């Protein structure tokens, strides 16, 4: 019996379509490339349910005549390629003739197109690659192509599509890339009937960046331009300075020979250029254009042409890293020259007699109720006791050894006494205590961070919330608004009451008491960044991870900081709460809360042993 057989062309086409069409963004990419190749100066994109129900691209390009419109959905139908050898010199986008055929195999298509010289256009309707209707129609010059019911006859593929807001974000990022690559084209985007993006044509790339990322960022953008002679590599574009950053990589755009590509090593090269410039966990804004000899780059290594391979990748990576680094250094040097310090720094030594040992009440801690002492000292005690005074307190009401158990043997654990000596505060950052023969340094920020994290994680629903007298307005990207709406209950569960306002703003009405001094704009944008980064993982794991990260971030923002001066009572209160806290040996980010020096170690340092 014969085992090998030929698949019917229609079934083979559906399987082949999976190599080109993975999600709605792939369809939008192919249609936009066709519009640009057709010479369009205005392109409008309509989406319904993130592309699940409808993707419609309308352009004012050259259009097609009846014959071309009928054949364009056939596999390998192309106007740009005649022989294999021409692949190395091709400069247009869609040239293999597979995209429209693949789209037609998995959706319902309506094509309306007309050439400028034609008296009327043609309307073609297809369903699963089968022509259902062809008729003349009155229309303007250009092409209007609608893709409806994606994967409607392939439920196994359809169920792997992400939620509409997720797919919309992928499409919007793609459109941002086209906007940056073609600033002279007018792009408009409508999602579920609402205008989400409107980018009229501009002549300068910096103006296009302002359209996409905000009109107030002009002063934060830096031009770059660098050329390498051998081999010939040209690099130009725009990067953000040290004050402009995002919470994810969504604003990193790299173009190679006018193609938007996703290349991890090139992205890493940009990040290396920003090393020691941006805070940890922050990502730069960058739009880089790389031009190389077409014979030194392969654009056909990926079915959707999203990735490229260079003949000499390391040279390009080094050029990007060095150029970004040099541009930032020159910018900072220019700022120092144009904005000199308004005062001179003296280098005199403080005499011991000038040191003030009087107690200092840390006023800002009054707004951090978690640090208020469990008991109040008498006025005489609090005034007479200097910072460096040694205080005694029963261990049972304060703190056990804050060092992980592995740092002590069992006998040491059993011999811990019931008292510790509070020595004081070192460098307004570390609380020093003596416990038996150990000197223990406690990082006040890490310790308080752990205390608050456990409180948020275990008793968040019991914590008081504060309703703002004057609600706070936060600006967000219009493409991020559906994400906020999708996860609104997540914020509500964590005590943050918000609602959308317009197309690119949020209003915060209430928040937990511990967060009243936190920068809510940063916090909300950070959560948006996490939602984008972890959107692909399983839903339950996603929410657990986001809750964990949010509680850690909130604890970090609300905790006392290094440099905050504490009173004796506040130090005792911090130690007492740390003793009662689970997982007290490290902060939520993994840093240790304390460090121990034994008496033998100290004596060896002073050569007493």
Image (spheres, rainbow, N blue to C red):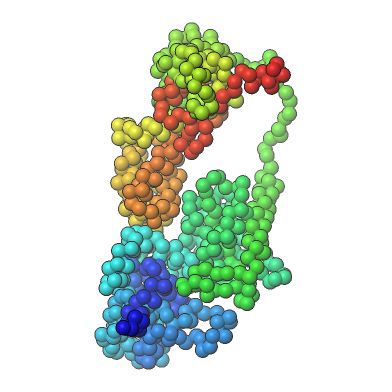
In the image, is residue 38 above or below residue 302?
Answer: below
Name the residue rendered at 39%, 58% in the picture.
479
Which residue ends up furthest to the front in the rendered image?
A: 1
Residue 112 image point, x, y percent: 33, 83
Q: Is 399 positioned to the left or the right of 492 in the image?
A: right
Direction top: furthest residue = 380
Q: Position of residue 35 (x, y in %)?
A: 44, 78
Spot occupied by residue 236 in the image (x, y as percentages of width and height): 62, 65
The answer to whether 441 is drawn above or below residue 85 in the figure is above
Residue at the location (55% across, 79% down)? Answer: 91
Nearest the camera: 180 or 202?
A: 180
Q: Report whether 76 appears left or right of 468.
A: right
Residue 351's quadrant in the figure?
A: top right
Q: Quadrant of residue 75?
A: bottom left
From the viewer's perspective, tell me whether residue 244 is left or right of residue 162: right
Picture residue at 40% right of the left edge, 24% below the top: 580
**Quadrant that contains the C terminus:** top right
Task: Kindly tell me whether residue 34 is visible in this rendering.
Answer: yes
Q: Inspect this view and state whether residue 112 appears.
A: no
State whether residue 513 is above or below residue 58. Answer: above
- Which of the image's four quarters has the N terminus? bottom left
Residue for point 41% across, 62% down: 170
Q: Position of residue 88 (x, y in %)?
A: 58, 80
Q: Is residue 358 left or right of residue 454?
A: right
Q: Nearer the viewer, residue 270 or 20?
A: 20
């Amino acid at each position: 019996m014969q085992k090998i057989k030929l698949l019917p062309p229609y079934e083979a086409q559906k399987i082949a379509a999976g190599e080109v069409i993975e999600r709605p963004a792939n369809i939008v990419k192919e249609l936009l490339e066709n519009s640009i190749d057709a010479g369009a100066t205005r392109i409008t994109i309509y989406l319904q349910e993130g592309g699940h129900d409808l993707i419609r691209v309308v352009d004012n390009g050259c259009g097609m005549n009846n014959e071309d419109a009928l054949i364009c959905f056939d596999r390998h139908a192309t106007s740009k390629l005649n022989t294999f050898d021409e692949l190395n010199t091709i400069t247009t986008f869609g040239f293999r003739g597979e995209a429209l055929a693949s789209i037609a195999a998995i959706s319902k298509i309506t094509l309306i197109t007309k050439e400028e010289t034609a008296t009327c256009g043609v309307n073609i309707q297809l369903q699963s690659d089968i022509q259902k209707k062809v008729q003349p129609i009155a229309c303007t010059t250009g092409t209007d192509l609608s893709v409806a019911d994606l994967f409607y006859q392939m439920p196994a593929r359809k169920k792997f599509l992400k939620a509409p807001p997720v797919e919309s974000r992928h499409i919007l990022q793609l459109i941002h890339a086209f906007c940056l690559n073609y600033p002279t084209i007018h792009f408009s985007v409508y999602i579920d009937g609402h205008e989400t993006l409107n980018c009229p044509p501009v002549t300068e790339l910096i103006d296009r960046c302002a359209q996409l990322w905000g009109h107030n960022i002009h002063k934060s953008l830096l031009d770059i331009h660098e050329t390498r002679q051998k081999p010939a590599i040209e690099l130009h574009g725009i990067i953000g300075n040290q004050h402009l950053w995002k919470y994810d990589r969504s604003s990193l755009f790299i173009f190679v020979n006018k193609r938007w590509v996703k290349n991890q090593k090139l992205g890493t090269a940009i990040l290396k250029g920003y090393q020691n410039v941006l805070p940890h966990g922050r990502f730069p804004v960058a739009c880089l254009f790389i031009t190389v000899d077409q014979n030194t780059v392969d654009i056909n290594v990926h079915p959707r042409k999203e990735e490229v391979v260079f003949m000499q990748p390391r040279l390009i990576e080094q050029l990007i890293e060095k150029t970004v680094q040099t541009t930032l250094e020159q910018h900072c040097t220019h700022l120092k020259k144009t904005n000199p310090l308004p005062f001179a720094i003296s280098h005199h030594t403080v005499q011991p007699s000038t040191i003030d040992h009087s107690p200092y009440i840390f006023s800002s801690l009054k707004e951090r109720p978690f640090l208020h002492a469990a008991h109040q000292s008498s006025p005489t005690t609090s005034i007479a006791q200097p910072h460096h005074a040694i205080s005694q307190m029963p261990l049972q009401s304060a703190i056990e050894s804050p060092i992980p158990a592995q740092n002590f043997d069992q006998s040491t654990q059993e011999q811990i006494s019931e008292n510790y000596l509070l020595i004081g505060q070192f460098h307004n950052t570390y609380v020093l205590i003596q416990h038996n023969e150990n000197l223990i340094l406690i990082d006040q920020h890490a310790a308080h961070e752990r205390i608050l994290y456990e409180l948020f994680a275990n008793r968040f629903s019991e914590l008081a919330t504060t309703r703002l007298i004057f609600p706070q307005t936060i600006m967000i990207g219009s493409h991020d608004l559906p994400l906020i709406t999708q996860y609104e209950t997540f914020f509500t569960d964590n005590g943050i009451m918000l609602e959308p306002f317009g197309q690119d703003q949020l209003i915060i009405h209430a928040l937990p008491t511990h967060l009243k001094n936190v920068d809510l704009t940063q916090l909300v944008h950070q959560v948006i960044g996490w939602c984008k980064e972890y959107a692909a993982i399983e839903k339950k794991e996603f929410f657990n991870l986001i809750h964990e990260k949010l509680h850690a971030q909130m604890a970090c923002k609300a905790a006392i900081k290094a440099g905050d001066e504490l009173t004796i009572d506040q130090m005792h209160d911090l130690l007492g709460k740390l003793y009662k806290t689970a997982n007290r040996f490290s902060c939520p980010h993994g840093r240790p809360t304390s460090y121990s020096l034994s008496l033998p170690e100290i004596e060896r340092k002073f050569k007493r042993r």
